[in-house]
């Protein structure tokens, strides 16, 4: 699972947990603890496999260098920024059938 997918999942659950949301859509924070534990365990196992020499030989993978991690983040951050900008537009503007913008009051 990619970090971006995890970010989107947590963001959607956080949006449903806000007090302004419908009572049917609210999640108690205690329900998020198993999800956060599963995410933490998943990332921990990935990094253990990646950075333990014996396990990286078994799975035939090589760890990323620092410069490769920087390149990953350079490609990932613009995608995140564009997604957040599109969410901002969708929250603040409605498009009717004539594709004219109407500000939500």
Image (spheres, helix red, strand yellow):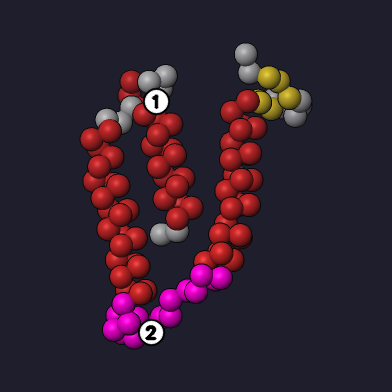
Viewer-proximal residue, 77 or 1?
A: 77
Tell which circle, 2 or 1, labels the residue nearer the N-terminal end.
Answer: 1
**Image quadrant in which you'd find residue 11:** top left
Instruction: Locate the N terminus and report the quarter of the image it occupies.
Output: bottom left
Q: Position of residue 68 (x, y in %)?
A: 55, 71
Residue wearing tag 1 = 18
Instruction: Locate the C terminus and report the quarter of the image it occupies.
Output: top right
Residue at horizontal 30 percent and vertical 62 percent from the top: 44
Q: Is residue 88 left or right of residue 26?
A: right
Determine the CA span between mark 2 and mark 1.
44 Å
Task: Count neighbours of disc 1 (C-alpha within 10 A) and say few if under 14, some if 14 to 19, many if 20 or more.
Answer: few
Residue wearing tag 2 = 60
- Residue 103 appears in the rendering: yes
Q: Position of residue 82 (x, y in %)?
A: 64, 45
- Residue 60 part of the magenta-drawn span: yes
- Seen in the picture, residue 76 relative to 91 is either above or below; the reply is below
- Residue 54 part of the magenta-drawn span: yes
Name the outermost residue toward the top: 105
Residue at horizontal 29 percent and vertical 84 percent from the top: 54
Q: Is residue 74 left or right of residue 55?
A: right
Residue at horizontal 23 percent and vertical 35 percent from the top: 30
Task: Count neighbours of disc 2 (C-alpha within 10 A) and say few if under 14, some if 14 to 19, many if 20 or more.
Answer: few
Q: Position of residue 32 (x, y in %)?
A: 28, 40
**Image quadrant in which you'd find residue 48:** bottom left
Q: Say which element carries label 1.
A: loop
Q: Say which element carries label 2.
A: loop
Q: Please tell me how many numbered marks the rendered image carries.
A: 2
- Seen in the picture, residue 26 relative to 86 is either above or below; the reply is above
Q: Position of residue 7 (x, y in %)?
A: 45, 47
Region rendered in magenta: 52-68
């Amino acid at each position: 699972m990619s970090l971006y997918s995890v970010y989107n999942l947590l963001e959607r659950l956080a949006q449903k947990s806000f007090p302004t949301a419908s009572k049917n859509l609210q999640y108690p924070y205690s329900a998020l603890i198993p999800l956060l534990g599963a995410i933490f365990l998943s990332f921990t196992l990935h990094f253990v496999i990646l950075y333990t020499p014996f396990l990286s030989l078994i799975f035939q993978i090589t760890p990323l260098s620092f410069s490769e991690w920087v390149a990953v983040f350079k490609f990932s951050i613009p995608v995140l920024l564009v997604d957040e900008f599109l969410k901002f537009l969708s929250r603040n503007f409605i498009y009717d059938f004539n594709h004219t913008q109407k500000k939500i009051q």
